[in-house]
Image (tube, rainbow, N blue to C red):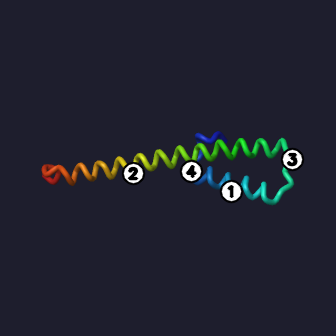
Amino acid sequence: MSPQHLTYRQAIEELETILRALETDAVDVDDLTARVQRSAELIRLCKQKLRSAESAIDQVFENLDEEDDDPDADE
């Protein structure tokens, strides 16, 4: 599945699966390379999703602050 179609939780779970496989399996170099590349894709996706969530949360708090500063907001 392409990383763009994964949820954050799915990406983390796949990363954990890759990590467990690397810790327990004798991985050949070709497979290791593919797993490392996939891990990098998943990490980029997770970072992007975290930044997006942080930005959305910051916007919510900014809107709340603006409402608190606007005396006409309660009317």
Tell me where residue 61 appears, x and y as whole percent.
Answer: 32, 52
Asked whether, in this view, residue 24 is left or right of residue 4, the answer is right
Point out the tag, 1 or 2, that comes first from the N-terminus. 1
Point out the tag, 3 or 1, that comes first from the N-terminus. 1
Instruction: Say what amino acid the circle numbered 2 marks.
Output: Ile
Instruction: Say what amino acid the circle numbered 1 marks.
Output: Glu
Mark 1 in CB contact with mark 2 (< 8 angstroms): no
| Disc 3 from disc 1: Cα separation | 19 Å
Label 4: which secondary element: helix
In the drawing, what numbered circle is on residue 8?
Answer: 4
Q: Residue at x 16, y 54 (%)?
A: 74
Mark 3 in CB contact with mark 2 (< 8 angstroms): no
Point out the tag, 1 or 4, that comes first from the N-terminus. 4
- Seen from the viewer's position, the closer of residues 29 and 5 is 29
Q: Residue at x 67, y 42 (%)?
A: 1
Counting other residues with Cα less than 10 Å from the Cα at mark 4, is it few (<14), some (14-19), or many (20 or more)? some
Label 3: which secondary element: loop
Point out the tag, 4 or 3, that comes first from the N-terminus. 4
Asked whether, in this view, residue 26 is left or right of residue 44, the answer is right
Tell me where residue 9 appears, x and y as whole percent.
Answer: 58, 54
Instruction: Say what amino acid the circle numbered 4 marks.
Output: Tyr
Q: Residue at x 55, y 47 (%)?
A: 47
In the drawing, what numbered circle is on residue 57?
Answer: 2
In the picture of the structure, the residue carrying the numbered disc 1 is: 16
Q: Residue at x 85, y 44 (%)?
A: 29
Instruction: Say what amino acid the circle numbered 3 marks.
Output: Asp
